[in-house]
């Protein structure tokens, strides 16, 4: 093998490493032997954390991270955030055919279409007087002035699975990256011991438990290292995170050390840049093995914070996930997505929407208040919404899936708080004023993160593929502060 | 001098390039080639507005055609060959005037200075235009006249020589046998195979290895791993509930086809159109399952038409991805932006698939598993058992049909025991609520006139016979009644709420109510809630003294058009005779209005009790009551057959038959199934404007091939079929199929294709590094009769394949992406191979071809978000835990996390290229997944048992087994130290040692010391985590 001795030294080849700012030796040895960094402060700006493919950014960003609170199942806009007094008066009347003729319809196919009045009172909240239904007392009380509601969303898919895929990836077809993967890929992550895109799922007890496919956080045609990582409520917090039984932390470290040394020996001989990457990934894996359990342990949270969220953690609840989301945000994770899987209210929409809202209200309000008091809300975007809304028409005493108009709201990082934008028609059926597409939402979020959605593309299937697709999409400047 | 292409390649190490980070170099080649240098930049910068999509074309100018650029009969071009300054194209791209400049600034994709130089020089050199390379006919290029042992090498060496380079040295023999064994079988060579190869100095030593590997059943499995990605094979339906679906026979078909070296044109035909072949074999039907491998939905609320549009469009995308290397998906909504494919092409291709029987919504399939047409696939043993059961059923059935003297005798007795009934003619009759009753010739009463919601009929019988042991109520169908039934409800039914008899001994005597018992009927309408007796609609319900209640009364919905009867026994024989009067009331007040009896009759008997209704039907009863001498032959036979069906003499035979039939049905239910294609009348396929499935305004289309490609010949003048489609794909004139296939084979054996965009040979694809070589291989492939093994062998026999993958810094700098092929590739194994390798080295691997998918260890709760139904993965047991990765249950929404971590695709769509990532999750899998820990301890056990006695020897043995090479002294040092420290730790902590060596189901032998085994397990884990262990080099 001597005839390869003219190869460049391992140090010279290190420049292939994505986290090239960190010297390998110090990286490997410090974390293998040392204790994990347990500080929970936001990473300082000077650190040479791994960066993304967009460097420099297209423009100065307003926000650094996104927490997407995903109300899976299809939250009824009419019971929650879209106040429709006009609909209240028409309870039980037939829906005018002029509105529904030729429109897509899901489970109500072939049935008589009758109006169901909104089932909850709406009240003005905060100094902005934002109208939110009574089932959100905490959110109304503490956060109304932070919220920027868009009432004019519409989507293209009427069934859960494709509608989720459309909301997350901008297309109904499988195989495209989720928004979180795009952002991690484009911006990198400020967390050096955690994935840049974390997903958590909680399940409520009111609506149908609709499935959620892992496709929703898949990296599609981006490198799979940008796939969202699910933090699980039970079992290993991340798959395969725990050492095998009978292997102590020290022994696991010995094994990783030996792997690293042998890989280094091999690299010295064959000079393959992939080996250096492999070494750094074992390093990161080992760091995750300590950082994630520490992250999930709320022992360092003061009692008033636990009281604020109403959780002591470890129960996989939405509130517990909200507190985890704050801890992830503090550690520099780029994109945090929380699914609450409970909003498919085909029946008893009155009781069920109240029940599900009660599962969510406190956690989301606590998260916003907590981020704000830490100064993190300024550069953290909160996204709150569903894959679609629900029909103004009754399905028994519930509502069916609905794609023509629904509400999402945003808070923090660059959004105008205490405002509403856009509107549905008098039935709450169709977005008519300032219509806002899912692609517009994506464009706006990218914009706030410092990215021009037109210019953020990756070649796939011969196209410059974008999160915002090929149809025109626009940044909704009107809702930005 | 190094030329341009190396610089282009340098920035395409991975096929993902963010447009904003593109870096250009100033150097450009001396000789411009249109397809290599100019077409890609026109495609990327101009085609979006001046390309194939007529709806987006600006200024009626297209730069994707020769006429558009150079002009033709009717138009002048925008390029004047040799004269850049006189060419509008040059002027518009080089101007500083932002109003004139192309591409416009807001397009966001400026031409780089280098692009401009290329364009200018191209015009200067005469602006030679070429059609897009992959749409041009496949040439049969001359083999370059250079010194090379193999035609493939001639093409490569010729290219290298122009760069002043030479191929690398041959790989070490250990490396070569490891490489070719993995490449052809997906498994490592055994130490014996390595040793044999090292010892074989003959010229044909290597070829012998290649032939052995190509003949191994493992070869088909390895090739299938790749093909199954393309045809999106999976074990679940993908949409919504992602329910399981049985198609594993298709996987077996693919493996067998590669192993038997089925010609690729035949392989293509069977998959696309196996069901349309004359008298298709089971194998061809299984192959036709290809068309049914797409995703399906059982989600309530699915709009069937929308999903039918999704399913059929996916088939066209898959066809393009699998065979044509064309990104046809773009054309679902608009003409292709870069390639000359149109929306009409897309929907015309859809029309080929319009005859496939399918549903948009597989309603209820989440519970029933009914995902459309399928066939059953009994094994040989199952087939035998089925035949045996069938024979037993036939035998028993024959016995039941065969008359015997004993049966005749029994039948006579049975007939004579039949009660004889006498009709009673009513003296008076009435209906309380307005129905009109009319007496008929047969003593029955027929209702007509108004139909009240409820009714009570009263019938008075005077001077009835004495000694009556049972009363019979006949209900008779009549032409005048609804549905020609016996009742007056719309469906011909009735509900007899209460039947009552009152007796008066003489005109003056008080009326006495008769207690009735033992009600029975010739037929009683069943109700799903009936559990035990009496049923809601039983005759018993008509004498329960309860006019409403939970049991409404006798009804006969399913058999309203046949005469039926109910029989009631009075507790004591009824008094009769002169002066006696019976008053019979039929109360009918069912909650659903109008359920009244339409025609009825009263009969009596004095036969011995118990008297029961006859359930054999009116026809048989009629025969019984016909004197035997007057019966026709048919009647005699019908009665005998009926009697045999109820004769107690045959009870044992019937019981046996029921048992055998159940066994047959159980076996039939348990038979493996697979989805197949079933051809039906083709449904209408139209262009869907903008892909909108609700828009019915588009033109209906017949099947047709894309206009830009050679059309070939249809086998018939009528509507073309999937057979025509398959034949067109593999016609010798099709320029894409063979190129796509050869390019992908090249990737399997070098790590990258000759054109590295494996999924797209169109304008946005990549100009091949060796276009002539690609044509040579594609041409050979066609000319060999689409012989896959021959193509594979030709590639792996080349010197290029056999050279080392080690690279010196000069060459790396010159050609970082190895476009010149002056060395072999180094790349990580595919997900399945990562697993298979560990299992093979550990000795746990179970080598067995085919069968249903298996479920190796998966973390509990991983399927928590699946629903309809909610599910938990059940780990397999025994041998099924140790099957190759390609047999792992492929759950589209939640693919096994170990496979997923190593970039196995979900197979929701055609996947031509897996990414090859390098992530921390991969490290966690190899470190902690029980499958790898278990394999490590099994490997540890063989190290101890077979690897000699000293640590030194054992480490050496372990390296030979795992990496096919000797251990290096430095490496030995690291592992000796690890072993020593862990041995002493586990000796001090036996409990932990036992825990580690108990991970997984594998039983280790008790003879090995626990601490020693645990320490070696960690050594084995270290080896299984090495980069080299998961790398093909």
Image (tube, rainbow, N blue to C red):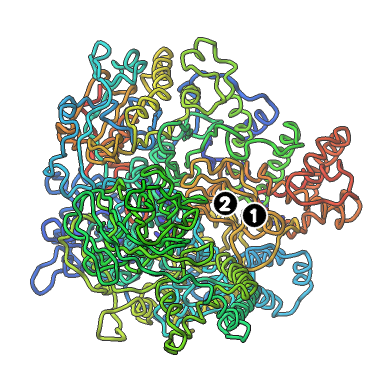
Proximity of marks 1 and 2: CB atoms separated by less than 8 Å: yes
Q: Nearer the viewer, residue B206 or B571?
A: B571
Q: Nearer the viewer, residue B541 or B923?
A: B541
Counting every numbered tag in the picture gives 2
| Relative vertical location of residue B532 with respect to residue A332 in this rendering, above or below | below
Q: Nearer the viewer, residue B214 or A163?
A: A163
Q: Residues within 10 Å of mark 1 (few under 14, many from 20)?
A: many
Q: Measuring 19% from the left and 27% from the top, which residue is drawn there?
A: A88
Tags 1 and 2 on a common chain: yes
Q: Residue furthest left?
A: B74
Can you identify the residue that label 2 sits on?
B899
Left or right of B600? Residue A243 is: right
Residue A452 in sight from this viewpoint: no
Q: Position of residue B384 (x, y in %)?
A: 64, 78
Q: Measuring 64% from the left and 50% from the top, which residue is drawn there?
A: B875
Q: Measuring 47% from the left and 53% from the top, which residue is drawn there?
A: B367
Q: Residues within 10 Å of mark 2 (few under 14, many from 20)?
A: many
Look at the numbered disc 1 and give the secondary structure of its residue. helix
The quarter of the rendered structure image containing the C terminus of chain B is bottom right
Left or right of A65? Residue B394 is: right
Residue A393 falls in image quadrant:
top left
């Amino acid at each position: 093998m001597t005839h390869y001795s003219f190869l460049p030294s391992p140090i010279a080849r290190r420049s292939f490493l994505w986290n090239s700012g960190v010297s390998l030796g110090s990286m490997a040895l410090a974390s293998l032997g040392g204790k994990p960094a347990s500080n929970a402060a936001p990473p300082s700006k000077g650190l040479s954390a791994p960066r993304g493919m967009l460097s420099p950014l297209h423009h100065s960003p307003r926000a650094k991270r996104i927490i997407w609170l995903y109300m899976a199942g299809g939250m009824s806009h009419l019971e929650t955030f879209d106040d429709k007094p006009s609909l209240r008066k028409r309870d039980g009347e037939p829906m005018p055919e002029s509105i529904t003729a030729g429109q897509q319809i899901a489970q109500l196919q072939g049935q008589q279409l009758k109006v169901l009045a909104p089932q909850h009172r709406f009240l003005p909240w905060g100094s902005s007087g934002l109208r939110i239904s009574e089932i959100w007392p905490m959110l109304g009380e503490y956060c109304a002035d932070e919220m920027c509601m868009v009432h004019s969303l519409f989507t293209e898919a009427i069934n859960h699975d494709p509608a989720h895929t459309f909301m997350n990836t901008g297309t109904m077809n499988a195989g495209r990256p989720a928004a979180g993967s795009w952002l991690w890929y484009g911006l990198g992550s400020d967390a050096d011991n955690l994935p840049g895109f974390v997903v958590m799922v909680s399940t409520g007890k009111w609506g149908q438990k609709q499935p959620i496919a892992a496709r929703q956080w898949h990296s599609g045609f981006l490198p799979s290292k940008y796939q969202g990582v699910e933090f699980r409520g039970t079992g290993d917090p991340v798959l395969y995170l725990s050492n095998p039984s009978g292997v102590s932390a020290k022994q696991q470290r010995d094994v990783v050390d030996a792997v690293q040394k042998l890989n280094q020996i091999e690299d010295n001989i064959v000079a393959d840049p992939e080996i250096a990457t492999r070494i750094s990934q074992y390093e990161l894996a080992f760091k995750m093995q300590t950082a994630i359990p520490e992250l999930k342990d709320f022992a360092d949270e003061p009692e008033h914070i636990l009281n604020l969220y109403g959780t002591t953690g470890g129960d996989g609840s939405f509130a517990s996930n909200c507190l985890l989301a704050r801890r992830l945000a503090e550690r520099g994770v780029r994109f945090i997505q929380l699914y609450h899987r409970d909003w498919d209210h085909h029946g008893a929409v009155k009781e069920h929407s109240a029940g599900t809202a009660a599962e969510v209200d406190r956690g989301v309000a606590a998260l916003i208040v907590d981020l704000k008091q830490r100064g993190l809300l300024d550069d953290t975007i909160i996204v709150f919404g569903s894959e679609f809304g629900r029909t103004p028409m009754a399905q028994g005493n519930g509502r069916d899936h609905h794609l023509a108009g629904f509400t999402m709201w945003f808070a923090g990082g660059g959004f105008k708080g205490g405002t509403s934008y856009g509107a549905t028609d008098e039935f709450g059926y169709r977005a008519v004023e300032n219509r806002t597409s899912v692609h517009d939402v994506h464009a706006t979020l990218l914009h706030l993160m410092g990215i021009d959605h037109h210019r953020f593309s990756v070649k796939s299937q011969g196209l410059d593929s974008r999160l915002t697709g090929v149809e025109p999409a626009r940044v909704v400047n009107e809702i930005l502060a | 001098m190094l030329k341009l292409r190396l610089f282009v390649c340098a920035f395409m190490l991975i096929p993902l390039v963010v447009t904003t980070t593109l870096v250009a170099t100033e150097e450009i080649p001396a000789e411009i080639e249109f397809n290599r240098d100019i077409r890609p930049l026109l495609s990327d910068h101009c085609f979006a507005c001046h390309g194939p999509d007529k709806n987006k074309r600006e200024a009626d100018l297209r730069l994707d055609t020769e006429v558009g650029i150079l002009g033709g009969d009717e138009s002048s071009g925008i390029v004047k060959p040799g004269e850049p300054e006189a060419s509008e194209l040059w002027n518009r791209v080089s101007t500083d005037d932002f109003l004139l400049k192309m591409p416009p600034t807001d397009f966001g994709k400026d031409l780089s200075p280098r692009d401009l130089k290329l364009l200018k020089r191209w015009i200067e050199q005469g602006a030679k235009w070429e059609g897009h390379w992959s749409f041009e006919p496949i040439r049969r290029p001359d083999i370059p006249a250079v010194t090379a042992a193999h035609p493939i090498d001639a093409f490569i060496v010729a290219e290298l020589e122009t760069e002043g380079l030479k191929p690398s040295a041959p790989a070490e023999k250990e490396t070569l046998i490891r490489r070719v064994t993995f490449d052809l079988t997906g498994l490592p060579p055994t130490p014996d195979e390595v040793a044999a190869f090292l010892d074989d100095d003959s010229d044909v030593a290597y070829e012998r290895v290649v032939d052995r590997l190509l003949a191994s059943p493992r070869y088909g499995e390895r090739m299938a791993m790749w093909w199954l990605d393309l045809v999106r094979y999976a074990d679940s339906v993908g949409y919504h509930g992602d329910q399981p679906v049985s198609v594993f026979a298709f996987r077996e078909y693919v493996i067998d086809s590669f192993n038997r070296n089925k010609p690729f044109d035949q392989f293509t035909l069977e998959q696309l159109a196996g069901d349309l072949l004359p008298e298709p074999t089971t194998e061809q039907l299984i192959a036709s399952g290809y068309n049914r491998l797409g995703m399906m939905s059982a989600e309530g609320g699915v709009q069937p038409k929308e999903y039918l549009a999704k399913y059929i469009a996916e088939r066209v995308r898959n066809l393009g991805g699998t065979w044509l290397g064309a990104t046809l998906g773009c054309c679902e909504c608009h003409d292709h932006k870069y390639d000359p494919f149109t929306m009409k092409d897309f929907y015309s291709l859809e029309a080929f698939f319009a005859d496939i029987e399918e549903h948009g919504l597989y309603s209820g399939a989440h519970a029933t598993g009914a995902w459309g047409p399928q066939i059953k696939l009994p094994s040989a043993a199952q087939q035998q058992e089925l035949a045996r059961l069938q024979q037993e059923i036939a035998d028993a059935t024959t016995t039941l049909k065969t008359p015997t003297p004993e049966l005749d005798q029994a039948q006579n007795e049975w007939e004579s025991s039949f009660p004889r009934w006498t009709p009673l003619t009513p003296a008076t009759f009435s209906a309380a609520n307005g129905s009109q009753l009319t007496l008929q010739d047969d003593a029955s009463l027929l209702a007509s006139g108004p139909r009240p919601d409820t009714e009570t009929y009263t019938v008075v019988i005077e001077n009835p016979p004495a000694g009556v042991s049972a009363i019979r109520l006949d209900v008779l169908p009549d032409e005048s009644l609804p549905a020609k039934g016996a009742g007056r409800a719309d469906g011909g039914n009735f509900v007899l709420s209460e039947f009552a008899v009152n007796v008066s001994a003489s005109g003056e005597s008080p009326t006495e109510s008769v207690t009735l018992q033992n009600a029975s009927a010739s037929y009683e309408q069943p109700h799903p809630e009936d559990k035990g007796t009496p049923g809601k609609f039983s005759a018993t319900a008509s004498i329960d003294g309860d006019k409403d209640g939970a049991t409404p009364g006798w009804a006969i919905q399913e058999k309203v058009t046949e005469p039926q009867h109910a029989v009631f026994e009075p507790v004591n024989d009824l008094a009769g005779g002169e002066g006696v009067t019976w008053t019979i009331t039929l109360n009918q007040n069912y909650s659903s209005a109008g359920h009244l009896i339409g025609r009825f009759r009263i009969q009596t008997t004095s036969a011995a009790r118990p008297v029961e209704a006859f359930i054999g039907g009116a026809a048989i009863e009629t025969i019984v009551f016909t004197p035997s001498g007057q019966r026709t032959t048919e009647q005699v036979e019908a009665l005998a057959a009926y009697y045999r069906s109820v004769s107690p003499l045959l009870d044992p035979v019937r019981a046996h038959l029921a048992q055998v039939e159940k066994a047959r049905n159980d076996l039939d239910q348990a038979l493996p199934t697979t989805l197949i294609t079933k051809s039906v009348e083709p449904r209408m396929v139209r262009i869907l404007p903008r892909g909108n499935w609700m828009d019915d305004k588009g033109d209906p289309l017949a099947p047709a091939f894309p206009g830009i490609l050679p059309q070939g010949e249809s086998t018939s003048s009528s509507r073309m079929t999937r057979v025509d489609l398959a034949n067109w794909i593999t016609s010798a004139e099709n320029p894409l199929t063979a190129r796509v296939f050869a390019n992908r084979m090249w990737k399997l054996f070098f790590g990258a294709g000759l054109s590295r965009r494996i999924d797209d040979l169109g304008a946005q694809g990549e100009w091949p590094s060796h276009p002539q070589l690609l044509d040579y291989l594609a041409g050979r492939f066609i000319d060999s009769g689409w012989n896959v093994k021959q193509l594979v062998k030709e590639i792996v026999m080349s010197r290029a394949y056999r050279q080392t993958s080690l690279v010196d810094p000069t060459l790396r700098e010159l050609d970082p992406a190895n476009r010149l092929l002056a060395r072999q590739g180094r790349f990580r194994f595919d997900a399945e191979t990562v697993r298979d390798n560990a299992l093979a080295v550990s000795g746990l691997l179970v080598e067995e071809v085919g069968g249903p998918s298996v479920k190796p260890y998966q973390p509990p709760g991983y399927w928590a978000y699946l629903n309809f139904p909610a599910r938990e993965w059940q780990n397999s047991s025994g041998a099924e835990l140790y099957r190759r990765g390609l047999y792992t249950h492929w759950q589209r929404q939640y693919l096994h996390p170990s496979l997923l971590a190593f970039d196995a695709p979900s197979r929701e769509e055609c996947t031509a290229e897996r990414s090859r990532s390098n992530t921390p999750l991969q490290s966690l899998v190899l470190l902690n997944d029980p499958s790898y820990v278990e394999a490590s301890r099994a490997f540890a056990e063989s190290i101890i048992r077979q690897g000699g006695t000293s640590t030194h020897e054992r480490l050496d043995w372990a390296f030979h087994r795992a990496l096919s090479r000797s251990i290096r002294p430095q490496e030995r040092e690291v592992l000796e130290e690890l072993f020593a420290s862990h041995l002493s730790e586990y000796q001090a902590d036996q409990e932990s040692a036992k825990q580690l060596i108990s991970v997984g189901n594998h039983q280790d032998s008790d003879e090995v010391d626990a601490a020693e085994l645990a320490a070696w397990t960690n050594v084995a884990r270290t080896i299984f985590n090495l980069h080299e262990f998961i790398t093909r080099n």
